[in-house]
Image (spheres, rainbow, N blue to C red):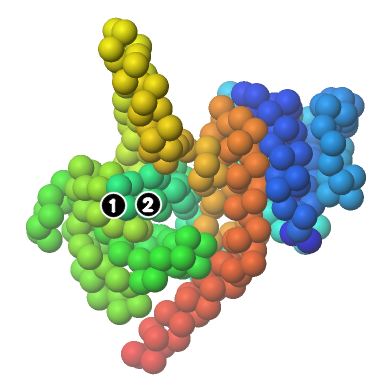
Amino acid sequence: MIKVAVDAMGGDNAPGEIIKGAADAVSRRQDIQVLLVGQEEAIRQELSKYSFTKEQIQVVPASETIQTDEHPVNAIRKKKDSSMVVGMNLVKQGEADAFVSAGNSGAVLVGGQMIVGRIKGVERAPFGALIPTEKGVSLLLDAGANVDARSSHLVQFARMGSIYMEHVIGISKPRVGIVNVGAEEEKGNALVKETFPLLKACTDLNFTGSIEAREIPHGGADVIVCEAFTGNVILKLYEGTGAVLISMIKKGMMSTLRSKIGALLVKPALKETLKAFDAAQYGGAPMLGLKGLVVKTHGSAKAGEISNSIIQCVTFKEQKINEKIKESLDAEEQAIENKK
């Protein structure tokens, strides 16, 4: 069984939606055991609402909760019995294969690096967010972890992202693009100009050059590389625009009797199309490059996103993503030694 520790107290809808998502995940997969970490009485009260195989869900007590407005470093250091710290320690100690949280993003980032720790050779661990496109999905990274990145970090992001897209999503030779303000190689800020030739020189990457923001929804690249400031802006604008468009379409369809009749006819096809833009179905954003898997979901995540995030961990573990990242780093280090 794949053991997934879940922060039952993190997020806007905890613990209700978190526990509902856990119950749904174990009903969908028999090879998952969920360790719900948090205030035992509250967790058991919510669990009593659902039917599940008892061996598949365990409760791990944790008396404290890290709030969304707390300082990340202080919270991780001081709240040793918080659901987040206890959950990450389960991963560190090998008692869980992964940790999922909808809680304080900064604390997840700090805890992932301080408690779980980075794989040897990984300079920075980015958040990788799957975003819907015309051609399926693309991986945007860094989506929020490292706002001040260097060129060497972006090259590692590209390598780790390529491994993830090939082995988790199943895209052979994923196309890598670096976010830029134009397609020409000479364009961009200092970071992009410095990173571009480094990516171009990587024979193990399918680097296709720059990608402008307007090409992202069209699926212009499978792995979209940038530092976290840019990545988080893209992600939030993407989510906001999608929500507004869906709202406007629904409003337009209900505006007249004719549009309401038309809406009934197109509803099945439209529902399926709009489903592709529902972030919940893609699960959370994994922190790539850690010794264990840490997945951050939206703070507003509901049961569906939590359930998909838990199941997402199974593929990550089965495909041995961490081992493949380590192999890639070792191969690059060996190549550098050979050139000396």
Task: Return the disc, 2 or 1, that comes first in the chain's sequence.
Answer: 2
Circle 2: element type: strand
Residue sitting at 31 percent across and 20 percent down? Answer: 262
**Left or right of 277, for residue 253:** left
Can you tell which of label 2 and label 1 is closer to the viewer?
2
Circle 1: element type: loop
288 lies above or below 229: below
**Left or right of 218, for residue 1:** right
Taking depth in this image into account, of 226 and 98 the one nearest to the observer is 98
Q: How far across and down, in percent of the image, does residue 152 sit?
A: 36, 64
Q: Residue 136 bears which disc, if any?
A: 2
* Mark 2 Cα shell of 10 Å, populated few (<14), some (14-19), many (≥20): few
Q: Mark 1 points at which residue?
A: 219
Q: How far across and down, in percent of the image, does residue 73 sit?
A: 61, 38
Callout 1 amino acid: Gly
Q: Do the residues labelled 2 and 1 touch (CB within 8 Å)?
A: yes
Q: In which quarter of the image is the N terminus?
A: bottom right
298 lies above or below 145: above
Taking depth in this image into account, of 136 and 229 the one nearest to the observer is 136
